[in-house]
Amino acid sequence: MAVPRSLARPLADSTFLRVYVLLALALVLTFGLALAGFAMIDQVRREHYREQLAEAPMVLLANQVMEQPVALREEWLAQRAETLDIGLHLYERDSLPLNYFQRSRLEAGRVLIQPEGEHGWRLQHLIPGEPRVLEAVLSTLSERQLRGLAVGLRQWLERVDPDQREERLKVLSATALGVELSDVPPEGLDEGQREHLANGGVVIRVLPESWALSLHLQLVNEGGPSQWVQVGPIKSFEPMPLSLSLLMLVVMLLVLAGTIYLIVRGVEARMARLELAATRIAGGHLDTRVKVESGDFLGRLGMAFNGMAAQVQSLLRAQQEMIRAVSHELRTPVARIRFAVQMVEDMTDEESVRRQLTGIDGDIEELDGLIDEILTYAKLGGDQAHGMVLETEMVDCRAVAARVVDALAPLHAHLELSIAPGDDVEVVAEPRYLQRALQNLVANACRHAESRVLIRLHGESRAIRLDVEDDGPGVPEADRMEIFKPFARLDNSRTRRSGGYGLGLSIVHKIMAWHGGSVMVDDSEELGGARFSLLLPVQPRSHSREPR
């Protein structure tokens, strides 16, 4: 079984395959961005957690260094380094290779944390009131370091009187860990832990319910009650909270939705251009073409559409040219026949011959009118007509109606042609074509009226309406769209009785389309026959306008 050529296209030319690929890329890209976002947020949170852990010990060590005499600082740092199993050094601030942001963080009292080796860390903190930086280098965090820092804290607090300890604790309480001083022993300690505190030891309590630990130590006051210090609780690093995860998920979905919207919007925009071109061609603009930007499915559809439009335009142009050529060619034999009839009429006085010649002359007049109608319709319906410019001006509709009545009344002496009284109505239009449209409607009404034809003028804020009513048989509702087609001859009493060429109403429809208006037909409430209405939009005064 042969595969149709339209189905044998390579997959690379498939618009829908491209859309699927773009959607897949959007999913992968969004997923990658989400992973990168999660990793970046997790990295920031880890750095913030390390800074919180390091802040209180570095503040304590910096304040202890500040209290030491300058000459004894190196010796004190060496002793503390051995006790804590970390490297402690003191540097001039300007001697360190720090960038602008690192210097700003140091001057703001924050701790700088940098990785050291595979598992170690380098901590730096500015000595309060001095241009010196305390640096601590540790390879790991152990219980020995925690106990050593707690012992150092107890010694630092015991150097001052009990009433001055609160001032020192305020320095540490400002950190993220939190340090509290109490006059009562901490709750939850057993007898052995209390005895260990009384002997100068440090108790490290693990709080499994909150994945945290706290440090407790006891301050002995000579001649007074003891005090207890609690550091922490020091919480372990928590994974990303649910609220933040949900926020990241929402952001990821929004990014994905936006990406899909942009992809679908591109396809929809191209389809909208096809729809617009089809609408314009349906409105008579046969020179409309679709811009082809690719060779995919929509591009091929656009090329096929352009080919179809060109073919239709070519056929209609050939049809219009043939109609004009035939009509022009018919004028010559018609003129010769008319001339011959006149010669015969001058050569005989017989009444029977003159009656026949009068009938022939009427037929020639009717044929001449048909040729004129065909030429007019060809001019209005040709695709080149859309390039013409209407010379519009402000037209007095009552004056136009009066001229039409004056022209047709002598031809239909048995009918009463009148214009309903009312206000004057003006509209921007091409005077000659507007009169032609109204005259065609009145002539059509005269052919079908029993005794009366009435013209009404209505002026409204957005449109004006010109009604032509008659007291004839009217137009059946099922045929009210057909009568505006060229050469339409409805099989009813209205058309059988009156004849006509079937082009007058088509010309009216074309003229109204040129002006951006419309023509419609319904029943006349007053006369009982048909009512044809010309609807024209109210527009600003203009001297020229391109037909729609």
Image (spheres, helix red, strand yellow):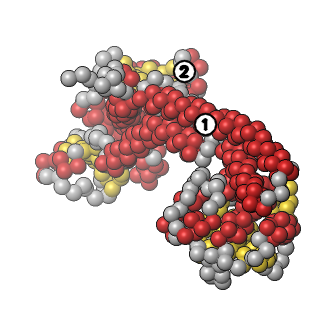
Q: Is the residue marked by circle 1 packed among few (<14), some (14-19), or many (20+) residues within 10 Å?
A: some
Q: Which amino acid, mark 2?
A: Leu
Taking the image as drawn, is residue 331 in sight?
no
Taking the image as drawn, is residue 346 in sight?
yes
State which mark lies toward you, 2 or 1.
Answer: 1
Q: Is the residue marked by circle 2 packed among few (<14), some (14-19), or many (20+) residues within 10 Å?
A: few
First reached walking from the N terminus: tag 2 or tag 1: 2
Query: Would you place residue 162 above or below residue 140 in this image?
Result: below
- Looking at the figure, which quarter contains the N terminus? top left
Marks 2/1 in contact by CB < 8 Å: the verdict is no
Query: Residue at 54% across / 17% down in the picture?
Result: 97
Residue 539 in picture, x, y percent from top left = 78, 59
Nearer to us in this view, 214 or 191: 214
Nearer to us in this view, 394 or 217: 394
Give the residue at mark 1.
319
Nearer to us in this view, 338 or 428: 338
Residue 303 in picture, x, y percent from top left = 50, 28
Query: What count of labels does the image hold?
Result: 2
Query: Residue at 60% across / 58% down in the picture?
Result: 484
Give the residue at mark 2.
98
Q: Which amino acid, mark 1?
A: Gln
Nearer to us in this view, 439 or 410: 410
